[in-house]
Image (spheres, grey):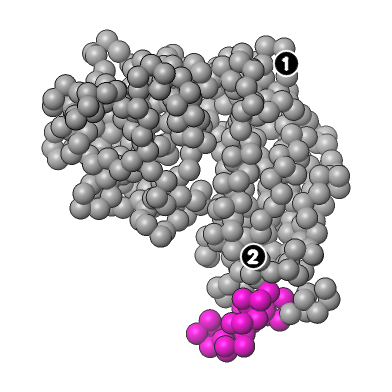
Amino acid sequence: MKSFQFARRRALQSLVAPRAFQSPATAQLWKRCFSATSAAASQLAPLDPSKLTVSKTTTPKELTAPKDLVFGKTFTDHMLSIEWTATEGWHSPQIVPYQNLSLDPSACVFHYAFECFEGMKAYKDESGQIRLFRPDKNMARLNKSSKRIALPSFDGEALTKLIGEFVKLDSRFIPSERGYSLYLRPTMIGTQKTLGVGPPGSALLFVIASPVGPYYPTGFKAISLEATDYAVRAWPGGVGDKKLGANYAPCVLPQLEAASRGFQQNLWLFGEEEYITEVGTMNLFVALKNKETGQKELITAPLDGTILEGVTRDSVLGLARERLVPKGWNISERKLKMSEVAEAAEEGRMIEVFGAGTAAIVSPVRTISYRGKLVDCGLKETEEAGEIALQMKNWIEGIQYGDESHPWSYVL
């Protein structure tokens, strides 16, 4: 073990030299020391909830009235913090008062975007029990994201237990009203002090929490999208299916441009075929009547590496296969061209379109701007949501708040 740690130190020290000048021996050292399958690496300390220490705040915050909550603006009293080093593995987890981070200006997260995160929520049911929604899915996705950018992996069940302790400590911030929840943001960053490019020798995993209200406080409000072909969000073989901070910043400018033309989000198209991928921060679902068979079909893009593996997406698919298929629906994960959507609208085969994500559960779409025309997505002028979107919101919300007993609901 000591020899392995010494080798890792040598590898990390090589970061001070430009990569172009590293020798073949150094490259082999990197591969041996930082391989995800390294037997020696498995001997490092795992994430251990039994070592959790808790330091409570001495200055509790005043609660914000639920009606005044703004997404991501208010935070709880505490945060979960866990350091990792290449020589020791995971350090003891800590729950500490919410505070600023102290990082060296050369920390690799600032220069090379070693950062990934998750978005999940805690809910309070009618009896006051606290519930998480499918946390195993968030843990699995965070591990996929972290591995893709050479950050450490962790035991998902262990982190879920730690998040549970954190949420219980700050449970007073979870509003009891329906539609409200505690938004959780697990985040992992590389903290290695270096300007060299290589696997970080140290990392920080932390979780912060923010009480949030319903996405549509006064009821659904259908949105309009701009089909975007002048910029590309993701591509095959890239990292569009990982939840990396670096995927989000480049999308802000196109969103501002779409907003300047009166549209709320970008609908990202890909390739000469103009395949639909996803919308802003949501996966997209299209319900239409199949041109060949006339059967009702609920379609979403496949997991081909260009879209995020959304937890809500997976939940919509699971519930649709369980509850819509018996009613004659066909549920498809397939490539869909924007021209096919426009054609379905022109031919009267369009039923409805909606986005799916953690923030809103579902977000109905009224129109899509495509090649200078507005594509009607099936809603009547007096409607703000279609039947399927409403059903999905009610079904998922019922599980989240414990109305329906379901294995997706994780009780703390």
Query: Which label is found at residue 328?
Result: none
Question: Would you say residue 98 sits in the magenta stretch?
Answer: no
Q: Residue at x 74, y 34 (%)?
A: 164
Q: Amino acid at mark 2?
A: Ala
Q: Position of residue 236 (x, y in %)?
A: 37, 57
Please state which of residues 195 and 275 is positioned toward the viewer in this rendering.
275
Tell whether 383 sits left or right of 339.
right
Span of residues in magenta: 8-33
Q: Is residue 270 visible?
A: yes
Q: Is residue 16 visible?
A: no
Give, as a three-letter code, the residue at label 1.
Answer: Gly
How packed mark 2 is, by other alpha carbons closer than 10 Å (few <14, some 14-19, many 20 or more), is some
Q: Is residue 27 magenta?
A: yes
Q: Whole-percent x and y of residue 267?
A: 30, 39
| Residue highlighted by disc 2 | 36
For the stretch drawn in magenta, the main secondary structure is helix
Quadrant of the rendering where the C terminus is positioned: top right
The residue tagged with tag 2: helix, strand or loop?
loop
Among the 4 quarters of the image, the one containing residue 73? top right
| Quadrant of the rendering where the N terminus is positioned | bottom right
In this image, 357 relative to 346: left or right?
A: right
Q: Is 322 positioned to the left or the right of 261 in the image?
A: right
What residue appears at the point 37 percent right and 30 percent down from the top-left corner? 331
The residue that mark 1 highlights is 128
Mark 2 vs mark 1, CA separation in Å: 41 Å
Q: Position of residue 398 (x, y in %)?
A: 56, 16
Instruction: Check disc 1 and report its element: helix, strand or loop.
Output: loop
Marks 2, 1: nearer the viewer:
2
Which comes sooner in the sequence, label 2 or label 1?
Answer: 2
Above or below residue 391? Residue 209 is below
